[in-house]
Image (cartoon, helix red, strand yellow):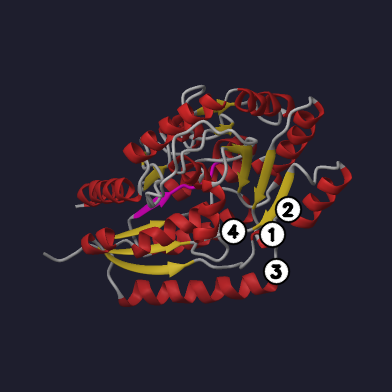
Amino acid sequence: MKKPKILFIMQLPPPIHGASMVNLAITQSKEINNVFDLIVLPLNFVKKIDDIGKASFLKVWYFIKIIFKLLKLLITKRFDLVYFTISPIGYAFYRDVIFVAVLKLFRKKIVFHLHGKGIKDKSEKSRLDMFLYKFVFKNEHVITLSKRLNKDVEHVYSKEPLVLNNGITYLDIKKEFSVKTDLTVFVYLSNLVISKGIKVFLEAIVLTKSKGHNFKTKIIGNSADFSIEEIKDFVKQKELSDYVAVLGPKYGDEKYEELSTSDVFVFPTQNDCFPLSILEAMQMQLPVISTNQGAIPDIISHNINGLIVMENNVEDVSTAMIQYIDDKRLIVKHGANNLQKFKENFTHEKFEENFIKVINVILDENL
């Protein structure tokens, strides 16, 4: 039986972020490649996280090259579907609208996989954006990361979006379920983006220390709109050298080694959808301190496998940290619950299975 041919238009590393890593996993999946014939057109305009959203002549040149590659593919090949991880907001969205216009001109059926949010807010504030979103999504399919995120497109998309949770490879790294006797170790793992809550976490460390608690923290991530040097300066100014280790970016085995020697994952994000870093922490049996952003309440249940705190609230984050410092048995309980929930819902195998189901549903509708 002939495999459906799908054109994948997507961001791939570098830079490394959640969406690009999910996209890479899709292209490398043996299961997905066994079912579908994948033709990949990478949307690579920057190499560093802090270059995202910045205009440059180089980006214009990359854009022109990709447009010509797209036209060549559309002229020379026949596709059953186009899978597009469109940027939902910002200048990147307006750029992607041009790609969509070309695809619609060639009468291609498109499925948009949304890894970000902000469409509802943008469309309500701008008639132009409302028009463009409706143009983009009209008569097409949309995949969101969680049913909670469907509300972000309800004003511009007439159908019910399909839902596909993220998943990552289960490494089965052993970590004993035992009550810790040493200092509680908190860890932050993400690019150093202010909206991810890194500044809030730093202030919470200061506050928790001021209350007389002993603990350790590790900050793992690459510079973005907040730099490694700025964090090091903060640590020095606030005399936190005995409390904070600024480790910079860690990948692969090094990343999981740091997670395996930590106790609690802290991620007080103010703008997120379905963070892969939370899944990485879950499979390493770490309780998670995070917010109600995006799909996080679907992943972390308050006082079951972590603690949900208010956004941009230093006191709330500090209180959650102290709760784990004072009750190490809670760390073990929440960590065990996290590993179980991860294995049941968020493995790469589960993602592959659901991805294939969702794409087949869309292909069947297009017949």
Task: Give the residue at mark 4.
Answer: 250
Q: How many discs mark residues in the rendered view?
A: 4
Looking at the picture, which amino acid does disc 2 mark? Asp
Looking at the picture, which amino acid does disc 1 mark? Asp
Mark pair 4, 1: CA separation? 17 Å
Q: Are marks 1 and 3 in contact (CB under 8 Å)?
A: no
Which percent across, then down, holds residue 157?
43, 39
Q: Which residue does the image show at 33% across and 56% down from the upper left?
A: 109
Q: Which residue does the image show at 67% across and 25% down from the upper left?
A: 322
Which percent across, then down, holds residue 238?
86, 41
| Residue segment shown in magenta | 110-117
For residue 274, side relative to residue 355 (left or right)? right
Of callouts 1 and 2, the N-terminal one: 1
Task: Give the residue at mark 1.
Answer: 50
Mark pair 2, 4: CA separation? 18 Å
Q: Secondary structure at mark 1?
A: helix
Looking at the picture, which amino acid does disc 4 mark? Lys
Which one is in front, 265 or 32? 265
